[in-house]
Amino acid sequence: MHIAMKRIYDEPSRDDGIRILIDRLWPRGVSKSDAKVDVWAKDLAPTSELRKWYNHEQSKRSSFVRKYREELEEKETAVQELLSSVDKRKRLTLLTATKDINQSHAPILGEFLDRQ
């Protein structure tokens, strides 16, 4: 399975494969028809409490990674439902509204899905 990440605000591409929005809240300024989202996996986003606590503060990154992985372990059913609903031979593109994808939850979720 090939997993890519991009911002929801970037133009959709045929190369995206299956487009999965991984934010808990729908991104501002993006219509659902323009987003071309195939799956909205809001249950796999960090909890609101964890997201607010982290606030993209670099000093909290390692703790955020650990806590988010723990949350994902507890969401095994949602993870399996997502994986069973997509064609694993196709490219998956994880979409987020976050400005800095590398500091977001996207790489953590991508790695977690890849190991399943």
Image: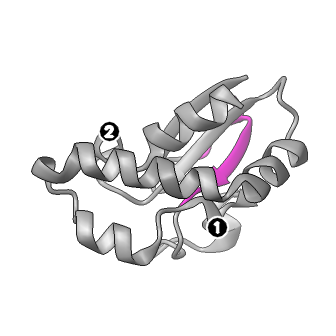
Vertical placement of residue 18 versus 88, above or below: below
Residue type indicated by callout 2: Asn
Residue type indicated by callout 1: Asp
Occupied quadrant, residue 33: bottom right
Dot 1 falls on a residue whose secondary structure is helix
Please give the range of residues in magenta. Answer: 12-22
Image side of residue 98 versus residue 53, left or right: right
Circle 1/circle 2 CB separation < 8 Å? no
Residue 41 picture location, percent across and down: 67, 61
Quick one: 16 or 101, which is closer to the camera? 101
Vertical placement of residue 98 versus 50, above or below: above
Residue 89 picture location, percent across and down: 84, 23
**On-image quarter of the N terminus:** top right
Determine the CA span between mark 1 and mark 2: 20 Å
| Residue under the image location 88 percent in, 34 percent down | 87
Residue 108 picture location, percent across and down: 46, 40
Dot 2 falls on a residue whose secondary structure is helix
Which residue is disc 1 drawn over?
A: 43
Occupied quadrant, residue 16: top right
Quick one: 52 or 32, which is closer to the camera? 52
Label 2 neighbour load within 10 Å: few <14, some 14-19, many 20+: few
| Residue under the image location 53 percent in, 62 percent down | 45
Quick one: 60 or 2, which is closer to the camera? 60
| Residue under the image location 72 percent in, 31 percent down | 116
Q: Which mark is residue 5?
A: none
How many numbered tags mark residues here?
2
Q: How is the image coloured?
A: one colour
| Residue under the image location 44 percent in, 53 percent down | 68
Residue 93 picture location, percent across and down: 62, 39
Question: Is 79 included in the stretch rendered in magenta?
Answer: no
Q: Earlier in the sequence, mark 1 or mark 2?
A: 1
Which residue is disc 2 drawn over?
A: 102
